C-alpha cells in the first residue's frame, strides 16, 4: 500500500490498527471515507505523513466503515478469538452488552431499525456458548455514581473545570492527540465497559466463587474504538487487585460481529426467546444506564444523580427528563438549576462540533461547566460497529434507535443510577462510596498525551 498515493483518495489504516481493516482491492477511490474522516472525525487532513513518521493516525471511531460503499473498510474481527475462548473448557467466558446493541442487533435479521431486541440478544449469546451474560447498563450506573460525584467535587473544591465526559474512547484519543492541554478536563471515571470488567474479575468472581484467572470478559458494543480502549495498558485494575497478570477487558466485539456469530452458529433469530434475562448480581442498570447509548444520555443520567447527591431527593420532572436533549443536533446548550448550584451543560455529537468548542476554550471562552461528547452522530447508536445503513436513511435510523432507548428509560421502574439496589449493594459490600480509596484505584483512570504522534521528528 503506497500511503502517499492513498493520501488523496482514502483514509490510511495501518496494519496494526486494532479496530479497522483496509482492503485495497475493493477500494474504488471514491474519497467518501476520506471526506468522512476529514470533516466529521477531524483526523484525515489534520496531520502530515512527513511529520508522523509515515504513520497514518486514527481515533478508531469506524465511521469510515459506515460510509464505505464497497466494504473496502471493515471491522477487525475478533470472532475467532471469542469462539476459541468459548470452546476452551477451562475458561469462563462472560459477555457484557452495551445498550445500543439491543436496538440494532435485529436489523441484520429483518427487524425494523430501533426494534428493542434485548431478550433475543441475551438468548443468542447463551446459545453461542457464553457462560454468563451481563448488562453494561449496570456499568453505566457505576460510571454515573463516580462521574456525578466527581463533577460535584470539582465544582465545590475548585478543581479542574470545565469537566468533559470520557465514556467515548475515540473522543478521549482525539483530545490526547490534538488537544493534550485539556487532558485534565476529562473525567477520570472509566467508561461503563471498562468500569464493569474489573468489577467482574473481583467482586463478581468472589460472589460466584470463580477464579478470576479463568474469566474471559467479552464486551459486545456498537463501537470499534472500544477495541482500542480494551488494549490501553492502564486498564488493568483487576490485575492490580488480584496480583495476577490479566486484562480487565479481554476481547471487544461489535454488533456486526455478534450478528455474524449468530449466523455462524446457525441460530434462527426469529426463534429466539424475547423474554430471556441477564444473569443476576450485575443483571441490569437503571433507565439512566440505558440512555448511555444516546447523545445526551450520559449528561442526563449524570444530572439526575448529581441533583440527588446535592439535595438527597430525586429531581423534578424537568430535570429528570430534560427536553430535546437526545436528538441529532450537533451542539446543545442547557442550564440546569440543581438548587444549590447552577450547571451549564453542553451536549456535543460529532468531533467536528467538539473541535469548535475546544477551540473556543483554548481562546479562553468558557461557555460551560460540563461537556458531554459523543464522536458518532447521535451517540453510540450509530457507532462504527453497528449494522450499516444507506446514507439516505442514516438519520431516520439514528432517530429510531434513539427513540427506542429513550422510551425504554421512561418505561423502567428505576430511572436513576443511585436508586439501583445492586449498585447500592456493590458499594456497601465492596467500594464503600464514590471517590473512596478503593473506587479511586478500581474505577478511575488517567490519560496520556499523544501529541508527539503528530510530529515524530
Image: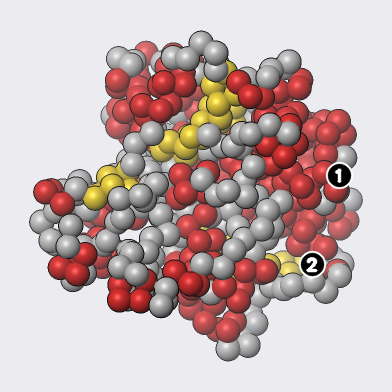
Q: Which mark is residue 173?
A: none
Report the number of numbered marks.
2
- In-image side of 87 versus 367 (left or right): left
Q: Are marks 2 and 1 in contact (CB under 8 Å)?
A: no
Which colour assignment does the render follow?
Answer: secondary structure
Quadrant position of residue 75: top left
Residue shown at the point (41%, 21%) measured from the top left: 84
What is the secondary structure assignment of the residue under circle 1? loop
- In-image side of 305 versus 12 (left or right): right
Residue shown at the point (29%, 56%) measured from the top left: 13
Residue 267: image location, x then y, percent? 34, 15
Q: Give how far apart the Cα atoms at labels 2 and 1 are.
A: 17 Å
- In-image side of 266 versus 323 (left or right): left
Mark found first going from the N terminus, 2 or 1: 2
**Nearer the observer, 326 or 440:** 440
Figure quadrant of the N terminus: bottom left
Residue shown at the point (83%, 63%) measured from the top left: 153
**Nearer the observer, 185 or 97:** 185
Residue 182: image location, x then y, percent? 61, 73
Residue that carries the numbered disc 1 in the rendered image: 433
Residue placed furthest toward the top: 89
Residue that carries the numbered disc 2 in the rendered image: 154
Residue 288: image location, x then y, percent? 65, 45
| Vertical side of 128 occupied by 327: above or below | below
- In-image side of 401 versus 131 (left or right): left
What is the secondary structure assignment of the residue under circle 2? helix
Asked whether the viewer can see residue 301, the reply is no
Amino acid at each position: 500500500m503506497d500511503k502517499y498515493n492513498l493520501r488523496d483518495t482514502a483514509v490510511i489504516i495501518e496494519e496494526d490498527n486494532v479496530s479497522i481493516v483496509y482492503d485495497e482491492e475493493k477500494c474504488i477511490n471514491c474519497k467518501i471515507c476520506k471526506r468522512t474522516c476529514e470533516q466529521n472525525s477531524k483526523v484525515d487532513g489534520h496531520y502530515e505523513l512527513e511529520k508522523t513518521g509515515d504513520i497514518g493516525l486514527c481515533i478508531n471511531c469506524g465511521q469510515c466503515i459506515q460510509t464505505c460503499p464497497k466494504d473496502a473498510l471493515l471491522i477487525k474481527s475478533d470472532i475467532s478469538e471469542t469462539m476459541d475462548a468459548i470452546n476452551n473448557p477451562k475458561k469462563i467466558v462472560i459477555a457484557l452488552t452495551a445498550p445500543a446493541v439491543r436496538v440494532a442487533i435485529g436489523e441484520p435479521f429483518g427487524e425494523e431499525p430501533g426494534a428493542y431486541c434485548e431478550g433475543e440478544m441475551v438468548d443468542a449469546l447463551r446459545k453461542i456458548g457464553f457462560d454468563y451474560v451481563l448488562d453494561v447498563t449496570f456499568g453505566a450506573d457505576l460510571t454515573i455514581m463516580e462521574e456525578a460525584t466527581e463533577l460535584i467535587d470539582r465544582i465545590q473544591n475548585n478543581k479542574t473545570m470545565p469537566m468533559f465526559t470520557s465514556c467515548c474512547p475515540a473522543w478521549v484519543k482525539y483530545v490526547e492527540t490534538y488537544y493534550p492541554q485539556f487532558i485534565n478536563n476529562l473525567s477520570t471515571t472509566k467508561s461503563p465497559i471498562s468500569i464493569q470488567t474489573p468489577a467482574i474479575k473481583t467482586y463478581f468472581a468472589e460472589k460466584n466463587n470463580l477464579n478470576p484467572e479463568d474469566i474471559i470478559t467479552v464486551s459486545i458494543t456498537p463501537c470499534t474504538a472500544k477495541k482500542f480502549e480494551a488494549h490501553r495498558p492502564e486498564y488493568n485494575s483487576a490485575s492490580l487487585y488480584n496480583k495476577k497478570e490479566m486484562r480487565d477487558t479481554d476481547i471487544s466485539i461489535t454488533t456486526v460481529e455478534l450478528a455474524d456469530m449468530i449466523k455462524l452458529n446457525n441460530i434462527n433469530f426469529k426463534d429466539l426467546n424475547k423474554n430471556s434475562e441477564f444473569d443476576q448480581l450485575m443483571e441490569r442498570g437503571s433507565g439512566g444506564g440505558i440512555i448511555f447509548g444516546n447523545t445526551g444520555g450520559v449528561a442526563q443520567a449524570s444530572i439526575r444523580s448529581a441533583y440527588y447527591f446535592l439535595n438527597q431527593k430525586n429531581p423534578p420532572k424537568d430535570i429528570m427528563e430534560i427536553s430535546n436533549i437526545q436528538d441529532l443536533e450537533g451542539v446543545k446548550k442547557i442550564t440546569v438549576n440543581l438548587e444549590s448550584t447552577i450547571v451549564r451543560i453542553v451536549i456535543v455529537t460529532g468531533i467536528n462540533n467538539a473541535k469548535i468548542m475546544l477551540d473556543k476554550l483554548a481562546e479562553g471562552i468558557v461557555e460551560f461547566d460540563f461537556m458531554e461528547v459523543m464522536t458518532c452522530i447521535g451517540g453510540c447508536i450509530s457507532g462504527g460497529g453497528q449494522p450499516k445503513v444507506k446514507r439516505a436513511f442514516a438519520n431516520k435510523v439514528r432517530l429510531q434507535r434513539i427513540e427506542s432507548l429513550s422510551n425504554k428509560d421512561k418505561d423502567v421502574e428505576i430511572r436513576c443510577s443511585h436508586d439501583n439496589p445492586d449498585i447500592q449493594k456493590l458499594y456497601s459490600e465492596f467500594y464503600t462510596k464514590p471517590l473512596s480509596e478503593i473506587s479511586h484505584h478500581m474505577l478511575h483512570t488517567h490519560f496520556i498525551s499523544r501529541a508527539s504522534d503528530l510530529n515524530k521528528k
